[in-house]
Amino acid sequence: MPRKLEEFQIIEEFFKPLTDGCKAAQNLSDDVAKISLKADEELVISKDLMVQDVASKLLRSNLSDLASAGAKPLHYVLGFSKNSGISEKFISDFASGLKSVQDEFGISLIGGDTVTCEKLFFSITIFGVVKKNKTLNRANAKKGDLIFVSGNVGDAYLGLKSLQNEAKIPENSLKYLLDRHFFPNPRINLGKELLKQDLSKCAIDVSDGLFADLKHICKSSKLSAKIYQNKIPISEEAKLVMQENPEITLLDLASGGDDYELIFTVNKKEIHKIEELSDKLGVKLTCIGELWGEIENISKKDIVENFEISLLNEKNQKIKIKKYGYEH
C-alpha cells in the first residue's frame, strides 16, 4: 500500500537534499530564505508556473528569464500542489529532474511550500544577481540597433506538434525536436557576456514567439522593427519537417514560442564583436533585422497601435503576420 506523504516528509526526503547544504536555504526549516548580497550587486527574481509539466522545463524556463537580464543564477524556491493521485515515484522523478538542471547551472533549492489541491501544479521563483544599474532590459533598445537572435526558432513548436500528433516528423528528427521542447537551453552565458563586454543593453527571451516577444521590445523602447524573412534561423530538422508538412510555414515556427532563445539588440559598430562572441560561446547568433523610427508624443495605451513590426521577403515586400505568438 502506498505511503501517505505529508508536506514535511516530502520536503525532508525529496527536496532538502537539493539544497546541497546551502546556507541561504536554512535547511528548508523556515518560510523565507535569506540571501546576502554585496553592496554593488542587485538581486534578480523571476517566477513561473506550469501545470502538469516536467521539472526540467519549468526550471530551465525560469533560468531563461535570468539570461534575458544578463544575471548570474543563484537559487530558487518551489511551490507545488499534491493530491491523492500523486505518487512517491512521481515526486522522486520530479526532484531528480530538478537536480539535473541545478547541477548543470550551479544553483540550489532554498525553500518553498505545498498545498493540497485536486489540480496538479508546480511553481518556481528564481533568484539571480547582476551589477547595480547594469542589466539587460527590453526598454533599452536604440534606433538603428541591429536585432539578433540566438540559436534556432521553431524547434520546440515542432516538438509539441509531434506530441499532439499534428505533424509528420521524420524519425531521425524526433528526438532532437522533443529535446528542444522539453529541455530548452537557457542562454545564461550569452546574457552575462553581452553585459560584461557592453555589447547590448536590451534583451528578451523567446517564450511566446519571436514576433510576440520582439513586440515587447518595440513597445517598451518605442521603436518599430524590420525583420527579414530569409534571415530567421531554423534548424535542418525543422526544414525536413516543413518538407513533409507543407501546411507548416516559417511564420508558424516564428510564432510558436517555447524556444527560450535570446533576442537582443546591438549597435551596428559592434557586429564584429558579436561574431567573435558567437565563436567563443559556440552559439549561433543571427542578425534578423533592425530597429527604426522612435514613437513620440503618444500615450502608453496608444503605443501598441503606433509601432510596427514589418516582415520583409527577399524583394523587400511586406508579409502579413497573422499570428504574433502565444496570447496569455
Image (tube, rainbow, N blue to C red):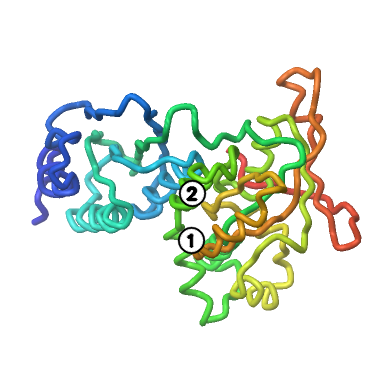
Would you name the residue on which mark 1 appears? 281
Say above or below: 166 vs 198: below
Residue closest to the eye, 163 or 194:
194
Whole-percent x and y of residue 155? Answer: 57, 64
Q: Are marks 2 and 1 in contact (CB under 8 Å)?
A: yes
Looking at the picture, does residue 314 appear above or below residue 193?
Answer: below
Q: Quadrant of the N terminus?
A: bottom left
Q: Is residue 317 left or right of residue 265?
A: right
Given residues 22 and 319, the one toward you in this image is 22
Quadrant into which the C terminus falls: top right
Q: Is residue 283 positioned above or below 299 on the image?
A: below
Q: Residues within 10 Å of mark 2 (few under 14, many from 20)?
A: some
Q: Nearer the viewer, residue 15 or 27?
A: 27
Residue for point 16% across, 47% down: 20
Query: What is the x, y in percent for residue 8?
Result: 12, 37
Residue displayed at 33% across by 24% down: 39
- Residue 104 image-quadrant placement: bottom left
Q: Secondary structure at mark 1?
A: helix
Asked if residue 139 lies left or right of residue 60, the reply is right
Amino acid type shown at disc 1? Leu
Secondary structure at badge 2 equals: helix
Judge the density around disc 1: few (<14), some (14-19), many (≥20) Cα neighbours within 10 Å. few
If you read the primary sequence from the N terminus, does the residue marked by circle 2 or circle 1 appear first? 2
* Residue 217 in view (yes/no): yes
- Residue for badge 2: 193
**Mark 2 residue type:** Glu
Q: Is residue 322 left or right of residue 3?
A: right
User: Percent x, y for residue 287?
Assistant: 69, 56
Asked whether the viewer can see residue 153, the reply is no
Residue located at (35% from left, 55% from top): 56
| Label 2 to label 1: alpha-carbon separation | 9 Å
